[in-house]
Amino acid sequence: MTNKNTGINPYILGKQIDKPEEFFGREDLFTFIEDNLNADIKFLLLHGQRRIGKSSVLKQFAHNINLQKFVFVYFDLQNHSNSSVRNILHDLAEEITEKLGLDSDIITLSSLDEELKNNLDIFSQKFLTKVYQKLGDKNLVLLLDEFDIVSSDNGILNQGNSFYIYLQLLLKQQTKLFLIPVVGRFKDDFQNLYQLFKSPPYQEVGLLNEISAKRLIIKPAQGMLEYEEDAIKAIFKLSAGHPYFTQAICFNLFLQAKIEEKLTVTSSDVQGIVDKTIESATGGLSWFWDGLSISEQVVFSAVAEAQKIAIEQKQSFPEDPLRLLKKHGVIQTELLTEATKKLAQKGYLDDTERRVKIELVRRWLVRCHPLNQEIYKLEEFETEEINNILEKITQLSQNNKNQGVIDHYEEIFKLNPNHFSTLSVLAESYLKVGNFEKTLELYTRAYQVNPMHNKEGLLLAREAYGKNLIEQRELIKAKIQFEGVLETEPDRKSAQQQLIKIKAELVKQEAPLRQVEEQLMKDHKNYSRTPIRQGVILGTIAAVIALVGGGIGVSRFFPSCSGGQQKVNSSCVSIHSNISRGDRTFFFTIPNTSRDQGIEAFKEGNYPQAAALFQNAVRDRNNKPDPEVLIYYNNAKAREKGNLLTLAVVVPADNSQDATQEILRGVAQAQNQFNANGGSNGRLLEIAIANDSNDPKKAEQVAQQLVNDKSVLGVIGHDSSEATQAALPIYKQAGIPIISSTSTANSLNGRNFFRTIPSDAASGEKLAQYAQNSALNKVVIFYNPKSAYSNSLREEFTNKFKGQIFRKIDLTDQTLNIEQELKESASQKVQAVMLFPDVHHTSRAIEIAKRNANNNLGLKLLGGESLYNQQNLNEGNKAVEGLILAVPWFRKAPQSKKFAKSAEDYWKGGVSWSTATSFDATKAFIKSLSFNPSRQSILAGLPMIELSSEETSGDVVKFNKEGERQSKAILVRVEKGHFQCLQCSP
């Protein structure tokens, strides 16, 4: 340090900052106050978390607000939580008297105190009158700190003659009085207060922006200590601009630098000081935990743990905390679901609801409140009733009444499904009565909660079940149980020995079955499938099974899953008919006789006949080509020729037929061009169409099926970001390449992931730039926090937007009052509404547009590509006139016109952006095909391909190292019921 005589640490912890030279930032807040006071707004409400610097802000008003006609008086209500209105008014008068330097002969506080006992109006009628005389033409502004400490009761409106009611009446009477209270409650906790004072303007005292935080880091130690730029960034990343934690980090860095006699702080120094900072800032950190409900605490720990896992595994988007809790054996309850939303509302989580907003807090949670420790707090619900039941169980156990014991344990789970200590004891009870499936279900969950404690119980239960199945000659099922044991404990001798015996027995028993199966396959080729013939076959199978003793069971010929289901990852899933190469249609409501006949021929393996029938069926009754049938035609030709290449496309066929048709048009057009030109080295392309319904769970099942089918070289899809996000880990693990043509969420990434649509980063940046260039400096965002796409677009816009985001609103909230939110936004000088719905909630966005128009609020509307279709134009009508959207492709853009014209001529109508991006995705796969392609060779080839604009829907296709297409979003505007390009040159 250059000034070795100065040993005082310049960073301030836990104290109000009075000196203006020690205060940094909050310029927007002071501008908000100044503007509203100039507009004669008499009540302004400030709110913020504890230790965020609210009191320091109030202390700086006189230094930062240049208004000559206002005098500011600070009054702290911290010690008045139980005071009467009279006592508060007396102390307030004393503070005003001292601040303004009033003479004691003008106002005698002792006499005022006596008078207030009899009549509270003395404060306004006598005291304030004299204050105004002293102030002359100036106004009095009372800055009321800890305003909500006066009452911890949320029912402010029901407190009769309370301090709040008194102030409300006082404001009506006093023209020269202004109030600016600060509350430490979270925004959703002061609705009654907000209602009492007639929806006043309010502002959050939040985190510092990066520029202000940088000044707070550098200036206090200027001349003594310097910070490298990377060190400043590291501090900001840890503190997120929270002034208390920024100071705490710098306080410890200053001490460490003094000990080590260093003049410069590096990023390594910052990382090395984290533990000391956590120890020294325990008081501030504990505030983030104390006061949370048990459910909120558990979810908070789960978010921190999920983030830790994502960081360790280098994933950009952490797992849903509720899903992580499920993996730890926690049953989701309404309280846990609500806890996530509440933590986000309190500002503890970012808008994704999957990240702790302040990194230092996250590290503290992982260290001091680990998830595997905190989940046990969930056992504390309904303890009194559960203890009564446990006493009854003790009595029943003594009398050997096992079923009664089981029934009472189940009652405990009805009261509290997360009473973990009941899991293993109930599992043991079920084991005693031979209910193995229930035993395994409970032990598996107990193992998830505490693997170390419950591992042996789970393994013994599996082995017991396996032995029971052997006795019943259910060898396949027994094999699964012992394999499950070895998955958990690979070297377990007892399970290894049982598996050796089972496999030997299976080999012995399968020999005669193979002979019968081979004979039946020969018969099947020679005879038609008449009901009589099928009866003979089935009778033969049954007879052979009976001869060998049924050891294998009938599952070899009849899967144990029910109709329409198949085993995937040892469980039954409904995937029947969800994948088709030509053996079914996904569009039953479209009548087409030739198509249906082609499907029957395809199923019979008569590919020349199928191709001829599909060719006749390609054009529907309106003479418009059907993309599904065109794909099946090409598939039949590929199978007829043999040695084909297979790609898959995943679409939401049964719940969004329009979107499915649009995607299939692009894929079919590219496939048809490729096959018409002879394919690759004489090999034609087959497309497998898979349906996931845009359902994440179904997407996982379909992905597993595609991965298991080794002929599938790559996947185009899925449609929604949520479905793609669910399926992506399965594709990653299998090393199968996937190109998304419609999923934009930034959380989608990986070595095997590519996309031909601009990501949400491109759309968010484009919208932010437009808003700023159009002087739309204050916006409100409507989005779905549970949607990967919606959340990602909101996050990207927020990161790029330099203006003020007034509020972020969950448009899926069933209690949402759209009209009230819009009117309040307009009253707070909001200029634009950002509409970021997911594909399932576009109608809610259109409703917002209609309410805006019907109330003549004049709010500008901006949004993403989920609103970019004719249906939304029709539904919104005049309400969406002027709507600005960031879209991935526009048919009237100069670079798109050539493809748009050829596609329009072929499909007998205009095509959408998803047709264009799906065409490009298919072309990218085709370009990567080598002489003998494999999943690995395609994965290696995709990063190196480059398709010119002549080969694509308009823009060049070239992927960067993250697998992103190097193209930008396009802005379009609704004009007279049509989309028009905003920035396209002729």
Image: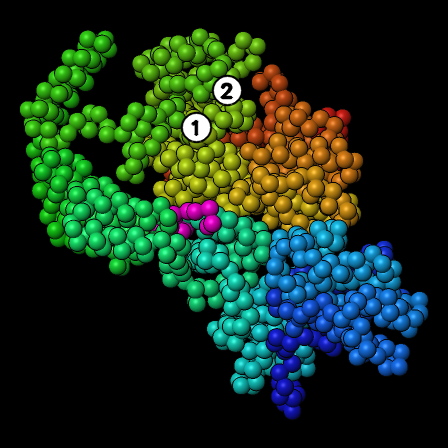
> Label 2 crowding class (10 Å Cα cut-off): few <14, some 14-19, many 20+?
many
**Measuring 63% from the left and 38% from the top, which residue is drawn there?**
864
**Measuring 93% from the left and 67% from the top, which residue is drawn there?**
137
* Residue on which disc 2 sits: 627
Q: Nearer the viewer, residue 598 or 801?
A: 801
Residue 333 lies within the magenta run: yes
Disc on res. 247: none
Marks 1 and 2, Cα distance to the nearest angstrom?
15 Å
Residue 343: give x, y in percent of width and height: 54, 55
- For residue 809, which quarter of the picture? top right
Q: Is residue 312 left or right of residue 981?
A: left
* Residue on which disc 1 sits: 691
Q: Quadrant of the C terminus?
A: top right
Residue 502 lies within the magenta run: no
Amino acid carrying label 2: it is Pro
- For residue 203, which quarter of the picture? bottom right
Where disc 2 sits, the SS reads: helix
Q: Which residues are magenta?
A: 324-336
Q: Nearer the viewer, residue 335 or 321?
A: 335
